[in-house]
Amino acid sequence: MKRAVIIGASSGLGLEVAKILLNDGWQLGVAARRSDLLRELQQQWPDRVMTAAIDVNDPQADAQLLALIDRMGGMDLYFHAAGIGWQNPQLEKEKELATVTTNGVGFTRMVGAAFRYFAEHGGGHIAAITSIAGTKGLGPAPAYSATKAFQNCYLQALEQQANARKLNIRFTDIRPGFVATDLLGDNPRYPLLMQPQPVAQAIVRAIYGQKHVAVIDTRWHLITALWRRVPRWVWRRLRLAV
């Protein structure tokens, strides 16, 4: 039986991916800041779900991850679905710093711990939800787009390092467009808004297919390809609003 750990499994895409993996026969270690939100999963699959309260911003979160892996008897897939973000055109300090802390420091803490574990235990698969927002700096969401670009680059760097060290570690950088989860709040005006269930199915297909980068969906793949070609002098004059 394959074993996966999902950080950020209490809601949104983390929860939806957990349900798919459970239906596919995986054993899961699911974690979030509040473990009580994970009880329903554990009650439905008591023999195949272990829960833990892990806040990626806790300096001991990496040790807590290793403890969860030890309880499971090992890990084949680490799936990182924890993250925060806001539109912040007023550049409110608290929102910017919280985003950098969770999506930057917390992400590095947890993905780095998973990398070191796999390096010491013969390999595995690291998959993480980043975002199409990392393609370009987005004025309405400065810290969010910047931290997503950081995540894209960090995963790419780890993949290069794993290859250089001949480590059997695979990576999947998952870059969804806008998904109707709690992260977006109640704003219905996001363009090309997608529902969590089909996005989660696409994520699992990308993981099973061992894709290096998965932009979800095809429309966003085309849009981000165009974004990359926009010259900087044009991009800075665009008025992006949602």
Image: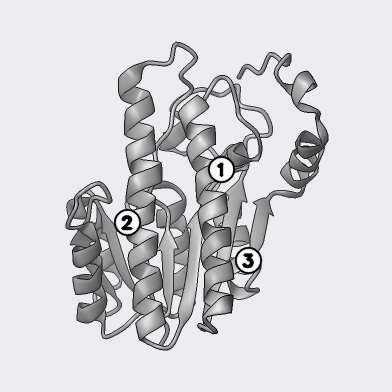
For badge 2, the amino acid type reads: Arg
Which residue is at a point 34% across and 42% down the rendered structure image?
Answer: 102
Question: Looking at the image, is mark 3 or mark 2 earlier in the sequence?
Answer: 2
Residue 1, quarter of the rendered image? bottom left
Query: How busy is the neighbourhood of tag 3: few (under 14 within 10 Å), some, or many (20 plus)?
Result: many
| Residue 61, horizontal then vertical, whole percent | 22, 58
Residue 120, quarter of the rendered image? bottom left
The foreground one among 187 and 132 is 132
Which residue is at a point 75% across and 47% down the rendered structure image?
Answer: 221
- The residue that mark 2 highlights is 109
Question: Looking at the image, is mark 1 or mark 3 earlier in the sequence?
Answer: 1
| Residue extending furthest toward the front | 164
- The residue that mark 3 highlights is 206
Alpha carbons under labels 1 and 2: distance apart: 17 Å
Which residue is at a point 56% across and 40% down the rendered structure image?
Answer: 179
| Residue 156, horizontal then vertical, whole percent | 58, 60
Q: Which mark is residue 149?
A: 1
Query: How busy is the neighbourhood of tag 2: few (under 14 within 10 Å), some, or many (20 plus)?
Result: some
Q: Is residue 113 visible?
A: yes
Q: Are marks 1 and 3 in contact (CB under 8 Å)?
A: no
| Residue 240, horizontal then vertical, whole percent | 66, 18
The foreground one among 86 and 100 is 100
Q: State whether residue 17 is above or below residue 69.
A: above
Q: Is residue 43 visible?
A: no
Q: State whether residue 123 is above or below residue 65.
A: below
